[in-house]
Image (tube, helix red, strand yellow):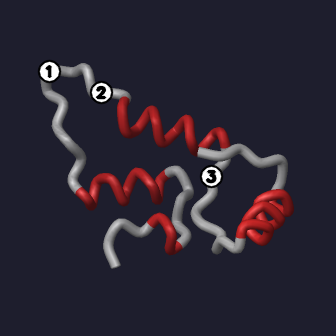
């Protein structure tokens, strides 16, 4: 994970390295993703999320760009 100051900083960083821009998220989205992904992991009833459940989590926290699609 890399932290950037702004959208422009991301674009400059990618351009200097000749890389296509990938997925980005805000710190709040990162926290929401961590809570949704790991929040109940210590529960005896925990089970791995299905791909559809994982996609629903990404959508719920606003990660909807094509980069975040789990299935083509």
Which residue is labeled 3 in the image?
A: 25
Q: Are marks 3 and 2 in contact (CB under 8 Å)?
A: no
**Image-quadrant location for residue 42:** top left
* Distance Cα–Cα, label 3 vs label 2: 22 Å
Q: Which mark lies nearer to you, 1 or 3? A: 3
* Residue 28, numbered label: none
Is label 2 in a helix, a strand or a loop?
loop
**Image-quadrant location for residue 65:** bottom right
Is label 3 in a helix, a strand or a loop?
loop
- Describe residue 25's horizontal placement relative to residue 51 as left or right: right
Q: Where is residue 18 in the image (x, y as percent from the top left)?
A: 70, 73
* Distance Cα–Cα, label 1 vs label 2: 9 Å
* Distance Cα–Cα, label 1 vs label 3: 30 Å
Q: Which of marks 1 and 3 is nearer the N terminus?
A: 3
Is label 1 in a helix, a strand or a loop?
loop
Q: Are marks 1 and 2 in contact (CB under 8 Å)?
A: no
The C terminus sits in image quarter: bottom left
Q: Position of residue 21 (x, y in %)?
A: 65, 69
Q: Residue at the location (36% across, 32% down)?
A: 38
Which residue is labeled 1 in the image?
A: 44
Q: Are marks 1 and 3 in contact (CB under 8 Å)?
A: no
Q: Where is residue 3 in the image (x, y as percent from the top left)?
A: 71, 44
Q: Position of residue 59 (x, y in %)?
A: 46, 59
Please determine whether, in this image, residue 31 is positioned above or below residue 25.
Answer: above
Which residue is labeled 2 in the image?
A: 40
């Amino acid at each position: 994970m890399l932290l950037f100051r702004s959208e422009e900083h991301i674009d400059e960083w990618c351009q200097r390295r000749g890389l296509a821009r990938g997925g980005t998220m805000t710190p709040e989205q990162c926290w929401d993703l961590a809570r949704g992904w790991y929040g109940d992991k210590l529960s005896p009833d925990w089970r791995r999320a299905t791909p559809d459940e994982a996609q629903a989590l990404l959508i719920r926290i606003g990660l909807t760009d094509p980069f975040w699609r789990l299935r083509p």
